[in-house]
């Protein structure tokens, strides 16, 4: 996040949707249908004032911006270049959050804190090229690594390494260093469903053994379930 003139940064903000959103067709659409872009432009101005200790005017600007765009960005946070807030409604970015260059954030995302202590970093750091899926909550002083991806509606309370995908509540890393493309929500496995099916099948086997005295079958079925469980662990750890 190197130093750059306000004009140059805003110019890049206006150009970013053309690279990230195939739905855009005209400059008029950019003016009327991209609240995330306007929230960032308002933030750029407010942030400059905030750093010069004009904190009340900065907060007023972002308060008005929140009413217009439905995006709540604290002027004290740090946002890099070519960041794109797609759709944007419901996005909340806290005071000590740090967002590096080329991050993609979808609607409903919260970059929030878990501490009420003043003067300390309470919000997450999102490294370059990361993608935060719609409705995701990233909470606390944690780091989402470079090119990492957070699945939609996930709740992240622990750091995510670079080039990894994290999903679930609480979020678990399910893909380490394998896919550097942008997040494809339709390809994310449902790890909670996998675990539920495993537990359900194990209970069925145990009930059958107790009621029908089929202890010999338990050993055979248990081997099948162990393989299912190993596949589940492999999904999380690799």
Image (cartoon, rainbow, N blue to C red):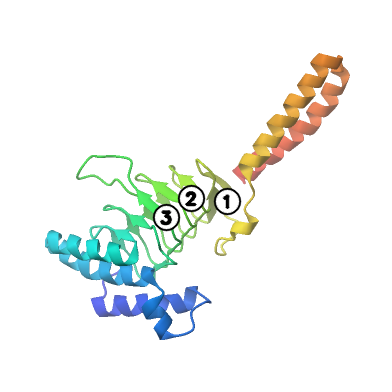
Q: Are marks 2 and 1 in contact (CB under 8 Å)?
A: yes
Count of marks, rendered view: 3
Residue 90 in the image, given as x and y percentages of width and height: 39, 57
Q: CA distance from mark 2 to mark 1?
A: 8 Å
What residue did someone put label 2 on? 161
In the rendered image, which quarter is residue 27 located in?
A: bottom left
Is the N terminus in the top left, top right, bottom left or bottom right quadrant?
Answer: bottom left
Q: Earlier in the sequence, mark 2 or mark 3?
A: 3
The residue shown at (55%, 64%) is 182
- Which of these two is toward me, 192 or 102? 192
* Label 2 element class: loop
The residue shown at (65%, 41%) is 193
The residue shown at (44%, 60%) is 107
Indicate whether 204 appears above or below 136. Answer: above
Q: CA distance from mark 2 to mark 3?
A: 19 Å
Closer to us: mark 1 or mark 3? Answer: 3
What residue did someone put label 3 on? 109
Q: Taking the image as drawn, is residue 162 in sight?
A: yes
Q: Earlier in the sequence, mark 1 or mark 3?
A: 3
Indicate whether 77 appears above or below 172. Answer: below
What residue did someone put label 1 on? 176
Residue 109 in the image, given as x and y percentages of width and height: 42, 55
- Which of these two is toward me, 177 or 122? 122
Q: Taking the image as drawn, is residue 5 in sight?
A: no
Image side of residue 48 versus residue 160, left or right: left
């Amino acid at each position: 996040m190197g130093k750059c003139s306000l004009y140059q940064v805003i110019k890049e903000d206006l150009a970013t949707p053309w690279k990230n959103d195939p739905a855009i067709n005209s400059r008029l659409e950019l003016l009327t249908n991209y609240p995330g872009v306007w929230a960032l432009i308002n933030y750029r101005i407010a942030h400059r004032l905030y750093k010069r200790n004009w904190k009340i005017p900065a907060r007023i600007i972002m308060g008005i911006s929140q009413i217009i765009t439905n995006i709540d960005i604290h002027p004290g946070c740090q946002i890099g270049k070519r960041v794109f807030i797609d759709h944007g409604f419901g996005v909340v970015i806290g005071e000590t959050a740090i967002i590096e260059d080329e991050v993609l954030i979808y609607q409903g995302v919260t970059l929030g804190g878990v501490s009420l202590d003043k003067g300390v970093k309470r919000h997450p750091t999102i490294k370059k090229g990361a993608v935060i899926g719609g409705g995701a909550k990233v909470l606390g002083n944690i780091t989402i690594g470079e090119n990492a991806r957070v699945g939609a509606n996930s709740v992240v309370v622990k750091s995510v390494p670079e080039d990894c995908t994290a999903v679930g509540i609480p979020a678990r890393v399910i893909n380490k260093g394998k896919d550097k493309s942008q997040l494809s929500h339709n390809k994310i496995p449902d790890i909670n469903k996998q675990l539920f099916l495993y537990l359900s099948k194990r209970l069925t086997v145990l009930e059958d053994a107790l009621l029908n005295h089929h202890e010999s079958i338990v050993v055979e079925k248990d081997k099948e379930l162990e393989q299912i469980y190993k596949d589940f662990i492999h999904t999380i750890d690799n």
